[in-house]
Image: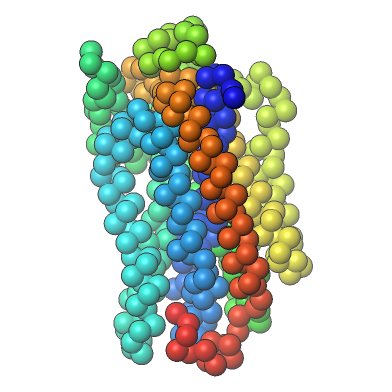
Amino acid sequence: MFDYETLKLIWWLLIGIILIAFAIMDGHDMGVGTLLPLLGKTDNERRIIINSVAPHWDGNQVWLITAGAGIFAAWPIVYSIAFSGLYWAILLLLSALFFRPVGFEYRSKIVSTRWRRNWDWGIFIGSAIPSFLFGVAFGNLLLGIPFHLDETMRAQFDGNFFDLLHPFALICGLVSFTLLVLQGATFLIHRTEGELQLRVIKVARVVGIVMLICFSIAGIWVFFLKGITIDTIADTNQAMNPLMKTVHVEQGAWLNNYKHYSWLWLAPVLVYAMVILTLVLQAAKRTAIAFISSSLAVTGTILTAGIALFPFVLPSNIDPAMSVTLWDGAASYYTLTIMLIVVLIFVPLILSYTAWSYYVMRGKLNESYIESNDKLLY
């Protein structure tokens, strides 16, 4: 089928595609959830906001599960280090996510202003905190994770939760947060009309500008960060472990891929172009095309970070030579082959039913629709 080296590269691309799909699909309903208590002035407006994503939010969660399963299958050592060493951060993420399903399901069960307002803020917490933490996670990858491997190849984590809250990581968190809020706002503009739609357009304009400012700050900051460069590495077409390479650390090394292949600068350029285009299309109410351009901005942002890190998957700032790359952190040849077959079967199925559900539930939402379907909607 493919040789081992090619399979490793294919799985790096697949994990990236899954993360992009997650950010686009689950990202927009997290963005909508973040905007819920801030933009809805009346209960009907808040129900419009909720029901814009109600048919899809739980189905979009499959991308988060797929991402976790894909990392477990393709890079088991990354899964073991990250999910154990970053235990408290992941626990905070999951705790926040718990508010989403409960909030969506129970928010409109009782006709009580206080009850509904509390659940609105619960949905906000379950949307805003994960949106922020995803960016913090990417920021910490560029800073390096504080772990090393002992003589038995067991990972030892030498940091704590608060070490992850580095100013650079927080800036990356703001990039992620504003990007997903912009994605959610763009989708909400597509599904709403009237005064509520105009309100979302105004907020999206501010969020988009803040996102580009934070993205620019993060990009400049990366130039001053110490990155890792591989000096020698064993045969990448063979089974490897993270100790079979030598590396060195230097300032600005995370930009080496951009220096060697100038066409890769198209990824960050895409972010600027698509965010600006999204804001222009929103103002013109070309809502469907605006959602496509917003999704391309999400794609460009993740590609920008992925290209900078390549081929590293989990850098270490304790002993950079023990950093995990896609070459030495991959599962066995047969595992990658079998999982590739599984992905080629099931991902098209996921895309098909997702596209069908969005097609069926297309159209604008307004107060009359909410009132006439009061008992059937969230």
274 vs 206, left or right, is: right
Q: Which residue is drawn at 35% across and 27% down?
A: 77
78 vs 359, left or right, is: left
* Quarter where residue 188 is shown: bottom right
Q: Residue at x 44, y 39 (%)?
A: 70
Residue 160 x %, y %: 24, 36
Q: How many marks?
A: 0
* Quarter where residue 319 is shown: top left
Does residue 256 appear in the picture of this structure?
A: yes
69 vs 17, left or right, is: left
Q: Observer-nearest residue: 156 or 54? A: 54
The correct choice, above or below, for 67 with respect to 81 in the image is below
Rendering colour mode: rainbow
Q: Observer-nearest residue: 342 or 17? A: 342
Does residue 207 appear in the picture of this structure?
A: no
Residue 112 x %, y %: 33, 88
Q: Observer-nearest residue: 140 or 356? A: 356
Position of the C terminus, as image quadrant, is: bottom left
Q: Residue at x 35, y 34 (%)?
A: 79
213 vs 338, left or right, is: right
The correct choice, above or below, for 329 with respect to 66 in the image is above
Position of the N terminus, as image quadrant, is: top right
Q: Which residue is drawn at 66% across and 48% down?
A: 296
The correct choice, above or below, for 222 with respect to 290 in the image is above
Residue 256 x %, y %: 59, 20
